[in-house]
């Protein structure tokens, strides 16, 4: 059976959480990333869509300022080779993110990966404010902006074994649904608490090695 690797972006494909850095840099005193907002989300009291809406009320940036800032960051250098090797084997890769498409699409294109499919939230830049949009919200859990569980179900319905690769709390819905999980950071710890089997990784060279093992290479 072919596999679909559904990869989180912020903190996973990008070693830095670009979305969090953007929210921190363009909100007063970094308020969009303070514990007063993040704490209820981590505990499950607040869904990620509501968290994003609350954060965006604090953010002010132009499209040019935002893109200039996010271009300071780069992807895991092992991600592009992982994608090429995975596709050559007949498996698939999709990027699934609770971040914003403006920097995600730009980062993928700069890495020569503009053909890799992705799903992310959108950010509309208005004078003096930013407005989040959630084009992938339908069919999800109702609490995420872009529920990764729905993407897992979609790929499984197409006949793929599903693999969720991630690092954080926004990956919880995907990890619950996926056939296999490759995790690090907060996601790995959460999976251990929830009794969800997960293979640890440090970078995409490690993910590629795990994929080869599963493929019997």
Image (cartoon, rainbow, N blue to C red):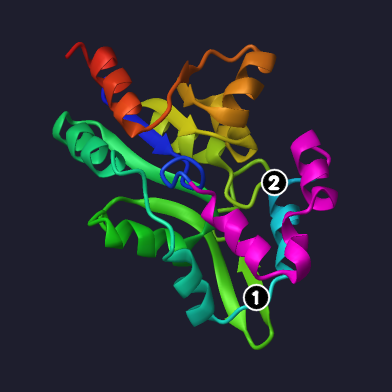
Q: Position of residue 5 (x, y in %)?
A: 36, 33
Q: In which quarter of the image is the N terminus?
A: top left
Tell me, yes or no, whether the highlighted magenta stretch contains residue 49: no
Q: Describe residue 27's horizontal placement relative to residue 112 as left or right.
A: right
Circle 2 sits in a helix, a strand or a loop, which is it? loop
Q: Is residue 112 above or below residue 45?
A: below
Q: Can residue 119 be seen in this view?
A: yes
Circle 1 sits in a helix, a strand or a loop, which is it? strand
Cα separation between marks 2 and 1: 22 Å
Count of numbered circles in the view:
2
The residue at which mark 1 appears reads as: 130
Q: Is residue 194 above or below residue 126?
A: above
Q: Describe residue 47's horizontal placement relative to residue 215 as left or right.
A: right
Mark 2, other Cα within 10 Å: few <14 / some 14–19 / many ≥20: few
Marker disc for residue 215: none
In the rendered image, the residue lying farthest to the bottom is 127
Q: Can residue 158 be seen in this view?
A: no
Residue interval drawn in magenta: 16-45
Residue drawn at the location 47% of the way across and 62% of the way down:
101
The residue at which mark 2 appears reads as: 142
Magenta stretch, main secondary structure, is helix
Camera-side mark, 2 or 1: 1
Q: Quadrant of the C terminus?
A: top left
Mark 1, other Cα within 10 Å: few <14 / some 14–19 / many ≥20: many
Q: Residue 185 sits in which quadrant?
A: top right
Residue drawn at the location 61% of the way across and 43% of the way down:
140
Q: Where is residue 48 in the image (x, y as percent from the top left)?
A: 69, 48
């Amino acid at each position: 059976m072919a596999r679909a690797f559904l990869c989180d972006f912020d903190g996973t494909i990008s070693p830095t959480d670009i979305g969090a850095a953007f929210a921190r840099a363009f909100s007063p005193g970094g308020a969009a990333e303070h514990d007063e907002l993040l704490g209820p989300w981590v505990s499950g009291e607040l869904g990620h869509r509501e968290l994003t809406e609350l954060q965006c009320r604090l953010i002010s940036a132009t499209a040019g300022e935002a893109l200039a800032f996010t271009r300071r960051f780069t992807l895991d250098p092992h991600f592009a080779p992982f994608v090429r090797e995975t596709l050559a084997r007949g498996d698939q890769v999709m990027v699934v993110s609770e971040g914003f498409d403006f920097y995600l699409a730009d980062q993928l294109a700069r890495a020569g990966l503009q053909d890799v499919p992705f799903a992310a939230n959108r950010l509309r830049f208005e004078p003096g404010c930013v407005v989040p949009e959630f084009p992938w919200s339908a069919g999800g859990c109702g609490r995420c902006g872009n529920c990764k569980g729905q993407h897992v179900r979609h790929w499984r319905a197409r006949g793929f074994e599903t693999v969720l690769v991630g690092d954080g709390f926004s990956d919880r819905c995907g990890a619950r649904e996926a056939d296999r999980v490759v995790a690090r950071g907060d996601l790995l710890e959460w999976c251990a608490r929830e009794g969800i089997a997960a293979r640890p990784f440090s970078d995409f060279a490690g993910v590629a090695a795990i994929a080869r093992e599963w493929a019997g290479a």
